[in-house]
Image (cartoon, grey):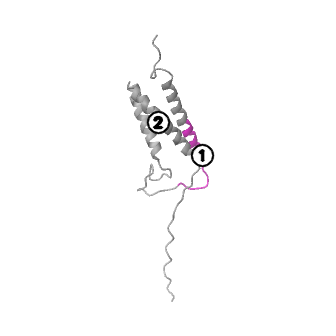
Amino acid sequence: VTPPTLLSGLFPYAVLTGLATTEAISAFIRTRAFYLQTGYPPLTLPPSSSSSSPTSGIKADSVGKCKQTLEMSGTSLFAAGLRGPGLLLLTLALPMAVESALRKVRPRTVVVWLPPPPPPPPRRIA
């Protein structure tokens, strides 16, 4: 019987369970927000903005993008048999997953600036 090592013990399962839990919480938060949204039409942004899609009011932040990149790279390495580097990347993604979920829960204010309307055209008096 060989003694368990860091890569064959419970540590990989703890990391993967933590990531799966935070992703499930994040999905629940997004789904709940979608179904409870009332009263306002969807915000449309110009195509030159840095949002995920031109019509999305949700901007993708750097924490979420970095978390997703670490998760995808770590999962790929882990599945390809490079368990050490894969587990390292997945472990680095865990605090970012928690922060990403917390950012979805925190209330925030969106300020929209609208330019003043143009002046009316001059009226001709006959």
Q: Please rate how many residues cluster around mark 2, counting C-alpha atoms within 10 Å: few if below 14, some from 14 to 19, many from 20.
A: many
Q: Secondary structure at mark 1?
A: helix
Which mark sits nearer the N-terminus, 1 or 2? 1
Q: Secondary structure at mark 2?
A: helix
Q: Residue at x 61, y 52 (%)?
A: 38
Eye-nearest disc, 1 or 2: 2
Answer left or right for 22 relative to 48.
Answer: right
User: Can residue 92 be found in the magenta stretch?
Assistant: no
User: Can residue 37 be found in the magenta stretch?
Assistant: yes
Residue 24 or residue 7, whichever sits in front: 7
Q: Which residue is mark 1?
A: 35
Marks 1 and 2 sit apart, C-alpha to C-alpha, by 28 Å
Q: From the viewer's perspective, is residue 48 above or below residue 96?
A: below
How many circles with numbers are drawn on the protein? 2
Residue 13 or residue 118, whichever sits in front: 13
In the image, what residue type sits under mark 1?
Answer: Tyr
- What's drawn in magenta, residue-wise? 24-42
- Give residue 122's position: percent from left, percent from top: 49, 82
Q: Residue at x 56, y 43 (%)?
A: 102
Q: From the viewer's perspective, is residue 62 above or below residue 125?
A: above
Residue 28 or residue 83, whichever sits in front: 83
Dot label at residue 93: 2
Specify the farthest residue to the top.
1
Q: Residue at x 45, y 12 (%)?
A: 2
In the image, what residue type sits under mark 2?
Answer: Ala
- Give residue 119's position: percent from left, percent from top: 50, 76
Residue 126 or residue 8, whichever sits in front: 8
Q: Main secondary structure of the magenta part?
A: helix
